[in-house]
Image (tube, rainbow, N blue to C red):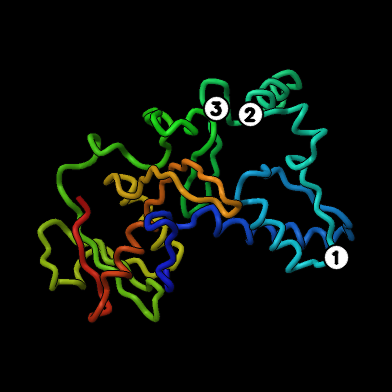
Amino acid sequence: MQANCIYEGVYLLGTSLARPVIARGMMDIVVQEDCQFVSHGCTGKGNDQVRFELAFYALQPEIEVIAPWRDPVFYERFAGRAALLEFAAQKNIPVFQTAAKPWSTDENLHHISYEAGILEDPNTTPPADMWKLIADLKNTPKEPERISIEWTKGIPTKLWIHPAGTPAESSTAGEVVTDAVEIFLTLNALARKHGIGRIDIVENRFIGVKSRGCYETPGGTILRRAHVSSIGPRTWYTELS
């Protein structure tokens, strides 16, 4: 948020933020268990293989990485998601994806992403039941809610949720949230309710191919818009509608 980071003009980097955190946790276990090898399930066509492996090597330069999706023996046996789902069903391995919902998801506190499967065709409209976090616009409240956010050195430090009808200058009225995580969770809940934070884009991957990605980033969308708009006074005021 401090740097107003954004990719392709719209994507708020929800998955890229998570990978170094996961990698750090893995490297902690590497040290604890005195491991020589780690593995990941990233495909050879995506960005995550780069994110994970650069983080692994930065934290533990001597580690060796096993990447099955770059091993011909593996990907010739499992040519794609359908083959993996079939194998999981045969072995009674519980997985979230199904043949009816054959897309990949990645969820964390910041966002959820959807890609692959039927989404690889840009002419395919994402089915309504794919979206998990944010309400469809036709199901959002007709009345707006008013909020203010105070920033300190690029970090949101106070959130006001104002009673209905409160004017902008009454920034001290209403519920106040000051804990960093609670500010984020509260904005997540507000944005989800008001249909804020969905995007559907065809983006450029690090290795040079294009990929269709659908993302839901509720609270993060409000925060970035607020920070970009907070030129002058440190407090940003808006209506969610």
Report the residue marked by disc 1. 62
Residue 59: image quadrant is: bottom right
Residue 83 spot, x, y in % from top left: 68, 24
Looking at the rendered structure, which numbered label has been put on residue 198? none
Looking at the rendered structure, which numbered label has been put on residue 81? 2
Looking at the rendered structure, which numbered label has been put on residue 102? 3
- What's under tag 1, amino acid-wise? Glu
Residue 152 spot, x, y in % from top left: 37, 79
Residue 52 as seen in the image, left or right of residue 74: left
Residue 96: image quadrant is: top right
Q: CA distance from mark 1 to mark 3?
A: 37 Å
Q: Residue at (63%, 60%) from the top-left corner?
A: 21
Task: Tell me the crowding category of disc 2: few under 14, some 14 to 19, or many 20 or more residues within 10 angstroms, Cα based.
Answer: some
Q: Earlier in the sequence, mark 1 or mark 3?
A: 1
- What's under tag 2, amino acid-wise? Arg
- Element under disc 2: helix
Q: CA distance from mark 2 to mark 1?
A: 32 Å
Task: Tell me the crowding category of disc 1: few under 14, some 14 to 19, or many 20 or more residues within 10 angstroms, Cα based.
Answer: few
Q: Residue at (43%, 45%) from the top-left corner?
A: 215
The N terminus appears in which quarter of the rendering?
bottom left
- Element under disc 3: loop
In contact (CB < 8 Å): disc 2 and disc 1: no
- What's under tag 3, amino acid-wise? Pro
Residue 61 as seen in the image, left or right of residue 9: right
Residue 84 spot, x, y in % from top left: 69, 27
Q: Residue at (22%, 35%) from the top-left corner?
A: 138
Q: Residue furthest top?
A: 90
Total labels: the figure holds 3
- Element under disc 1: loop
Q: Earlier in the sequence, mark 2 or mark 1?
A: 1
In contact (CB < 8 Å): disc 2 and disc 3: yes
Residue 155 as seen in the image, left or right of residue 230: right
